[in-house]
Every structure is written in C-alpha cells, then in structure tokens.
Image (cartoon, rainbow, N blue to C red):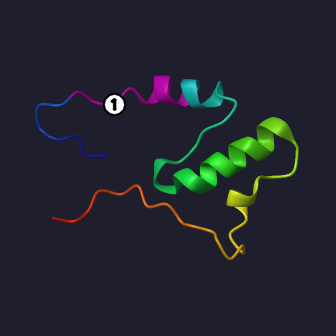
Amino acid sequence: MRVPTGEAEPDWLSALTSLKGSWFVGIAGAYHESLCAFRGAASGAQLPRFCDCKASDFVRANHRQPKS
C-alpha cells in the first residue's frame, strides 16, 4: 500500500490485533446493514422492521459525502 508523502506508515499489526479482539466490526459505507447485523448478533431476537429491506417503507440510508 502506498502511503502519501509526509504520513506515517500504518501500523498493520496493531490494526489486525485490534480487529481480532473485536466482537463486532461494522462497515461505515454499509451503516444501516451493519446496524442490523449488530442488533441481530447482539440480541438473537427478531430484527426490527427497519432491517427488512423488502418492506414497503424501507429506506436505504446513504452516508456518503455528496460529490462536489
């Protein structure tokens, strides 16, 4: 991986160690889906309605920055 000039090399070993020690890791680009996966894993109960992507009132969140 190329590191931009003036920036430190990422500490991949620490990042992987932290990741392996985590119970759950969500994805910012898939925030809604990650939240639903977390709720399902944490509770083991039926998922809330907002996690049903086939529901007629389902709204897909978009957390990306608008293009300029």
Q: Residue furthest left?
A: 6
Height in image: 57 above or below 48? below
**Residue ID at (57%, 54%):** 32
Q: Residue furthest right?
A: 45
Q: Position of residue 44 (x, y in %)?
A: 87, 42
Height in image: 68 above or below 43? below
Q: Secondary structure at mark 1?
A: loop
Q: Residue 56 versus residue 18: which sits nearer the camera?
A: 56
28 in the magenta segment: no
Q: Which residue is mark 1?
A: 10
Q: Residue 25 versus residue 3: which sits nearer the camera?
A: 25
**Residue ID at (76%, 53%):** 48
Height in image: 6 above or below 51? above
**Residue ID at (54%, 31%):** 16
Which residue range is magenta in the image? 8-16
Q: Position of residue 7 (x, y in %)?
A: 18, 31
User: Relative to 53, is 12 on the left or the right?
Assistant: left
Using a 10 Å C-alpha cutoff, classify the residue at mark 1 as few (fewer than 14 neighbours), some (14 to 19) or many (20 or more): few
Q: Residue furthest front?
A: 57
10 in the magenta segment: yes
User: Relative to 63, is 43 on the left or the right?
Assistant: right
Q: Position of residue 57 (x, y in %)?
A: 64, 71
- Rendering quarter of residue 59: bottom right
- Quadrant position of the C terminus in the picture: bottom left
Q: Position of residue 12 (x, y in %)?
A: 43, 31
**Residue ID at (79%, 41%):** 41
Q: Residue 56 versus residue 35: which sits nearer the camera?
A: 56
Q: Residue 28 versus residue 66: which sits nearer the camera?
A: 66
Type of amino acid under label 1: Pro
- Rendering quarter of residue 45: top right
